[in-house]
Image (spheres, rainbow, N blue to C red):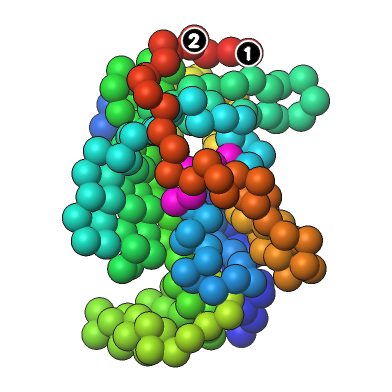
Amino acid sequence: MEGVEACCRRVGVQRWRPNRPDSPLFQVQVHARVDLPPDAVYAILVHPNNHKVFKAISSVPYRKVVAKEGAMQTVEVDHAARWSLGPLLRGTLLTRLLVKEDRSRHTVAFALRGEPGFMRAFDGEWRVRPFSQAAVDALFRPGPPWKAALVELRDRLSPSTSSLVTLMQRIQPAASPPPPVDGLVRAIAARQVKTLLTDLRAEAGRRAAGKGSALDEDEGEKGGEAPRRPPRPPLLW
């Protein structure tokens, strides 16, 4: 039987069947154990300056809370994201996202907003659960819905010092990349998602070692928002 750590290292990359031959949709999904409680992991994901944790995000030039109700909050945000594949292929891409945060479920969903530009679709979801063998089993060997609900209820009632974090991301370029470029797009997407999880685990390691947090220097800026939206820069290579 596959162990817990092996399950959490598994990475699934698949190409979805497109609606049209010229619009491929790529999906990447990664699971990882992060040695922080779910509340702490969620706080990092929704922090206004979390680009200090995630190296793939060079800056957040714009952020605005557009709706808030109870445990749910909707934020409009611009991410200047770095990407690379080897020493020669690298660049920066600005994406405008609508982010829906749900503190009660520890989920953060995001989707492309505004003009599509280079990307026709760019969406996904973070999900944070208390880490347990039962949670891993439910993830990789799902049973009936009532069993999944029972596992979720048990996890909510049992405090955990570690989290099972899932990041799912879907990417659809504006133009259909021909082979072998489509494989390159898939590789870049997988690398980006794995890098985000690696950075999150590195932040947990800093805190466990008593070295503070990458967010410490930004505590005074928490909640700050840009007064207006900056002009959208072009794709940089």
Task: Write down the residue under mark 2.
Answer: 234
- Tell me which residue sits at (32%, 67%) in the image: 105
Q: Residue at x 57, y 30 (%)?
A: 59
Q: Find out whether residue 140 is within the magenta segment.
A: no
- Kindly identify the amino acid type of the residue bearing the numbered disc 2: Pro
Q: Nearer the viewer, mark 1 or mark 2?
A: 2
Whether 151 is drawn above or below 9: the answer is below
Q: Position of residue 63 (x, y in %)?
A: 40, 33
Residue bounds of the magenta highlight: 46-51
Q: Could you say which disc has been placed on residue 209 in the image?
A: none
Badge 2 element: loop
Measured as percent of width and height from the top left, residue 143 is found at 34, 81
Left or right of residue 223: residue 64: left
Q: Seen in the image, is 5 located left or right of residue 138?
A: right
Q: Position of residue 204 (x, y in %)?
A: 67, 63
10 Å crowding of disc 1: few (<14), some (14-19), many (20+): few
Q: What residue would you read off at disc 1?
A: 237
Residue type at the position of mark 1: Trp
Q: How many marks?
A: 2
Give me the residue at 55% from left, 37% from top.
189
C-alpha gap between disc 1 and disc 2 = 10 Å
